Amino acid sequence: MSSTTADILLLALGSFGILIALTVLGEVLRARQPVHEPNPMLDTYMTRVQSWWGMVAFIGIALLMGKPGIMTLFAFASFAALREFLTLTTKAQADHLSLALAFFVVLPLQYVFVGLGWTGLFTVFIPVYAFLLLPMISALRGDPKRFLVRVAETQWALMIAVFCVSHVPALMSIDIDGYGDRSVLMIAFLVMVVQFGDLLEYFFGRRIGRTKIAPGLSPKTWEGLVMGVLSAMIIGATLNWITPFGVIGAALMAGTASFVGMLGSIVLAAIKRDRGVKDWSHLIPGQGGFVDQLDSVIFAAPIFYQLTVYFYT
Amino acid sequence: MKFLRKFAARIVGQSIRIFARAITAVRADWQGIEPLPRQRVYFANHTSNADMPMIWSVLPPAMRRTVRPVAAADYWLKNKLRAFVGPEVFNCVLVDRRPEVNDKPMDKILAALDEGSSLIIFPEGNRNMTEDPLLPFKAGLYNMGVARPDVDLVPTWVANLTEIMPKGEVIPLPLICTVTFGAPLHVQEGESKDAFLKRASDALLALRPEVRG
């Protein structure tokens, strides 16, 4: 067994240990809860823990399968996220072909470029080629009604669901001296610090949260956010052995990813509020859609990727 | 041979269902009824040829076996493939829309109800190609309600299919499709045809999910 595989298994076992602890905690709280008093906070907590079980299992298996596993997992996640996003955007029949191209050409090509490690191409393919060429195809059909809104919303859907999400597997293609095939572990690092930061942000927000960050949009508070980011930094520092960042570097990278992710989650909440929906879809029972599930990771991934490339290569 | 055709019909039916799920993640929203195998007439909005397969796909197996979509004979008998899929996969009640034909559609529909089948019908009569959410309903739904008063008339809204497969396009877009079932209606004592059709149309429109765009 290579040391990378051993580390993945160790992380998976660690995550399972934490999940077992969280599940037991929830069940104990539930057992102490009087049957007739509903406790929505506990229910939310338990559905979150359940979806994390699934997430840890899927990502763990994908990491062990290496590049093909990770590529397939995130390409599928992108497809599901793009479907949810474009279901809610403004579109006309004139956009039919450009939307079909977004799903069946742009999305697969982006993942092919990421898989081949063509860094120069996959970082510009969507913002340059897709953003400039797709509106041309829509324009050729000659329907000017709400054209800018249609084009802009389609571009945002591609940005969020394909460009941002594809930066998670793109972490594998970063070539860092002396780090070798271990770059796959950066995916585990990013997902873990962002998710644990979110969990602790939620916990502290409930406990000591006073000042709402965006009243009317999200229940997130500054107190919760600060505690969540600090927790992410501590977790990041503890996990520094799987990264090329060193202790302080790992803490700073984790804190930045967590902070960007939390604010990104408020952005997604604003879009949902504008469209009058509670969740992006109903694909994951009791949990909403893929965009709800990926949430903070979507915004954290490209920033984390760019910072890693800038400071560590 | 008959057995083979039946088997093929099952395979094709399952494939259509899996394809619909994979592309549109189609989902049933049981707002006004429970998914129980009662005799019902599902009346739905009609914007695309994919409407009927979508409703058919979200019904649980026991309900799917007893449901018969009412469909136009001229469409489903056009070629051999359609003549297999329409009557054998979906078990359609085929009705002839031409006025000069003696074969009255309502007789076939009532016969299907009398043998215990549930039905899927599109009371607008034709696919809606206009900007309006619904066309005025034809009298068929009212006549069924009067002739067989015990059968539940269930409003069924199919969302998003206009975007998934607009008329004249070849590639379906993978957007999320939701089929919403509302509370059942019955024709009331002394209710006029127009009053009932208006009530049915309003009940169907009320199921339309509100997405601000």
Image: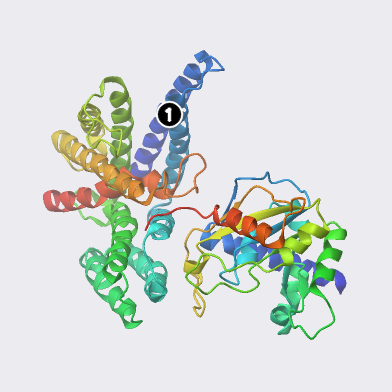
B141 left or right of B106 in image: left
Q: In this figure, which colouring scheme has been used for the structure? A: rainbow
**Which residue appears at 82% of the width and 75% of the height?**
B104
Check disc 1 and report its element: helix, strand or loop: helix
* Chain identifier of the residue bearing label 1 in the image: A
Residue B162 percent location from the top left of the image? 50, 68
Residue that sits furthest to the left in the current view: A311
**Which residue appears at 15% of the width and 37% of the height?**
A252
Between A63 and A260, which is closer to the camera in this rendering? A260
Residue B127 percent location from the top left of the image? 59, 73
B15 left or right of B25 in image: right
Question: Is B81 placed above or below A59 here?
Answer: below
Residue A2 visible in the picture? no
A73 left or right of A269 in image: right
Q: Image quarter for residue A212? A: top left
Residue A33 percent location from the top left of the image? 50, 15
Q: Image quarter for residue A235? A: top left
Which quarter of the rendered picture does the N terminus of chain A lie within? top left
Location of mark 1 (residue) = A45
**Which residue appears at 39% of the width and 48% of the height?**
A276
Residue B139 percent location from the top left of the image? 71, 67
